[in-house]
Amino acid sequence: MEDDCIFCKIIKGEIPSTKVYEDDNVVAFKDLQPIAPIHDLVIPKKHVQDITGVDDPEMLANLLHGVKEVAKAEGMDEKGFRLITNVGEDAGQAVMHLHIHVVGGAKLPTR
Ligand code: AMP
Ligand code: ZN
């Protein structure tokens, strides 16, 4: 846990969020500024900045398992959805706690 990380605060319940899925390893909640009808973020409960800082591959497996559960919970598993994870400055990563955007609920632009 990092004291001034907003996603760590969401995990601890110090900042409100609309949770859509949680298990021992990950939490998923609604993005505050959705770019599509459904836009959730899946994050590991352990603080790590981005995928380059992950040393246990199981964390990545746990995140993708969370993605699958979120897609099911949101009813996106039939029609499809998109994953995005922004890494670092060039990608415009704004929150420095690893997160996977799960976006869907509409036909998404291909470019
Ligand atoms: P990124 O550019 O990949 O770092 O995206 C960070 C995302 O976190 C953005 O889509 C924000 O809308 C979202 N976000 C920031 N603060 C919160 C919050 N308190 N609850 C939910 N989503 C948030
Ligand atoms: Zn954090």
Image (cartoon, grey):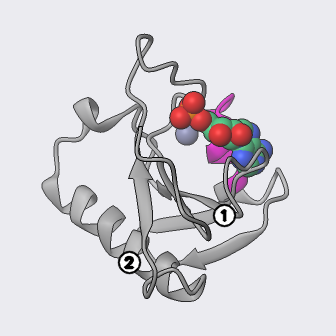
Q: Can residue 54 be seen at all in this image of the molecule?
A: yes
Residue type, numbered disc 2: Lys
Where is ligand 1, by quadrant?
Answer: top right
Residue type, numbered disc 1: Phe
Q: Judging from the image, what secondary structure is the residue with disc 1 in? A: strand
Q: Residue furthest top?
A: 89
Q: Earlier in the sequence, mark 2 or mark 1?
A: 1
Q: Does the magenta run of residues contain 9?
A: yes
Q: Name the residue under label 1.
A: 29
Q: How many labels does the image show?
A: 2
Q: Mark 2 points at which residue?
A: 68
Which span of residues is magenta-colored? 1-10
Tell me where residue 16 appears, x and y as whole percent: 85, 57
Residue drawn at the location 16% of the way across and 51% of the way down: 56
Q: Does the magenta run of residues contain 40?
A: no
Residue drawn at the location 52% of the way across and 55% of the way down: 108
Q: Which of 14 and 97 is in front in this view?
A: 97
Tell me where residue 72 appears, x and y as whole percent: 48, 87
Tell me where residue 11 appears, x and y as whole percent: 64, 57
Q: Which mark, by number, is residue 103? A: none
Q: How far apart are marks 2 and 1 (CA)?
A: 14 Å
Tell me where residue 98 appears, x and y as whole percent: 44, 41
Q: Is mark 1 within 8 Å of ligand 1?
A: yes
Give the foreground label among 2 and 1.
2
10 Å crowding of disc 1: few (<14), some (14-19), many (20+): many
